[in-house]
Amino acid sequence: MDTFRETQQEFRFLLLRSEDLRPLWRPEPEIIFLLKGAGHIYFTDSKSEYTLRETDIFVINSFEIQHLELEGNALALSLTLSMDFLMSVSPELLNYPVNRLVT
């Protein structure tokens, strides 16, 4: 019995390394915090590429097809938020699109 997959989690943290495989898209929004090193994120639909550096935070909207590539021994922390959780905290958030912005 795999309770991790059988229960709806409000939010989930994952530690990502360069050798880790991850989904190309998710049904929930994802926040990536680059803890160490550097990397790139590629968006297939818009053909956009962004460079990530240590301490950068990047938000990925639900259902966006993307690929995260971490360099060498880089580490990133991924936080995914369920739509049920977002609706319970602030239902009006679902009325606004998430725009990508890198500074």
Image (cartoon, grey):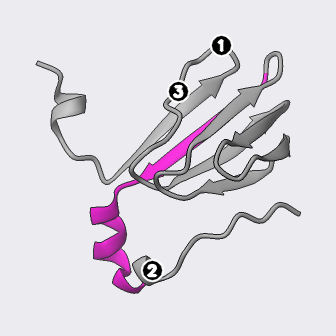
> How many C-alpha atoms fall within 10 Å of the one at disc 3: few (<14), some, or many (≥20)?
few
Residue 75 seen from this side: no
Residue topped by disc 2: 93
**Magenta region includes residue 79:** yes
For marks 2 and 3, give the CA distance. 26 Å
Q: From the viewer's perspective, is 29 left or right of 46?
A: left
- Asked whether disc 2 touches disc 1, contact meaning CB atoms under 8 Å apart, the reply is no
Q: Residue at x 45, y 80 (%)?
A: 93
> How many C-alpha atoms fall within 10 Å of the one at disc 2: few (<14), some, or many (≥20)?
few
Q: Residue at x 66, y 70 (%)?
A: 99
Residue topped by disc 3: 22
Amino acid type of the residue that numbered disc 2 sits on in the rendered structure: Leu
Q: Which residues are magenta?
A: 74-92
Q: Measured along the vertical axis of the image, is residue 21 above or below residue 30?
A: above
Q: Residue 54 appears at what percent x and percent y?
A: 85, 41
Task: Tell me the quarter of the image containing the N terminus.
Answer: top left
Q: Nearer the viewer, residue 32 or 68?
A: 68
Q: Measured along the vertical axis of the image, is residue 5 above or below residue 63?
A: above
For marks 2 and 1, give the CA distance. 34 Å
Amino acid type of the residue that numbered disc 1 sits on in the rendered structure: Glu
Task: Tell me the quarter of the image containing the C terminus.
Answer: bottom right
Amino acid type of the residue that numbered disc 3 sits on in the rendered structure: Arg
Residue topped by disc 1: 19
